[in-house]
Amino acid sequence: MDELERLRQRNRDLSEQVGELEEQVRQLRAMLTPQVELPAWMPRLSGIERSIILTLLARPFVPYEAMLNAVWPMGEGRDGAEPDVKTLAVYVTRLRRKVEGHGIIINGVWGRGLEMAQQSRDLLNPGFTSAGASSLHNNGGDDGSKERAAAG
């Protein structure tokens, strides 16, 4: 019975560690994807497209694996399958079509990840710096985004 009790205690210890690690992952994901107001001129985006844009606002370069984790935090798409880089590429293509006419450029770095130039990032949120990701907010400009958010 001593061996069984030791295994039970080990199981409880590991369960506690898993809980702590899950909380750390949740906090890191929250830091990776800042919550900012996008400009009123931004076309309507799906939730996944919005996650991609916000993640690229937080960091000028995002490796594919980090983007997959930011966009699909639970590791599952709508159909229950695990999204991969090809799935991400489909959403990025749709997103590019929506924002390219507004001067927003999203580039793929072959085999590595995605990047957005600072000029594009400034267009989306002029007051944003990745160092200030923990205290993001709109610059207070009257661009209609607050009214749009309240109406939506």
Image (tube, helix red, strand yellow):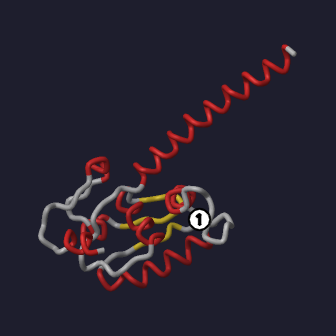
Q: Tell which of 54 and 77 is nearer to you.
A: 77
Task: Residue at 41% x, 69% y: name it.
Answer: 50
Report the side of 84 relative to 139 (left or right): right
Where residue 86 appears, x then y in whole percent?
A: 62, 72
Q: Nearer the viewer, residue 4 or 44?
A: 4
Q: Of all residues shown, which one is farthest toward the top? A: 2
What is the number of callouts on the image?
1
Please, what secondary structure does the residue beneath circle 1 have?
loop
Q: Residue at x 26, y 49 (%)?
A: 135
Residue identifier under label 1: 111
Residue 56 lies, with reference to residue 8, above or below; the image says below
Q: Is residue 103 above or below residue 20?
A: below
Residue 78 image offset from top left, x and y in percent: 61, 70
Quadrant in which residue 68 is drawn: bottom right
At 22% from the left and 72% from the top, the residue drawn is 145
Q: Quarter of the image holding residue 5? A: top right
Is 17 placed above or below 94 here?
above
Viewer-proximal residue, 35 or 106?
35
Measured from the top left, where is residue 12 in percent x and y?
68, 27
Residue found at the very far right of the displayed protein: 1
Residue 103 found in image quarter: bottom left
26 with respect to 130 (left or right): right
Looking at the rendered image, the quarter that the C terminus falls into is: bottom left
Query: In the displayed structure, does residue 10 sit left or right of residue 27?
Result: right
| Location of residue 33 in the rendering, given as x and y in whole percent from the top left corner | 41, 56
Query: For the residue marked with disc 1, what is the amino acid?
Result: Gly
| Viewport quadrant of the N terminus | top right
Residue at (32, 85) in percent of width and height: 101
Query: Does residue 69 lie above or below 105 as drawn?
Result: above
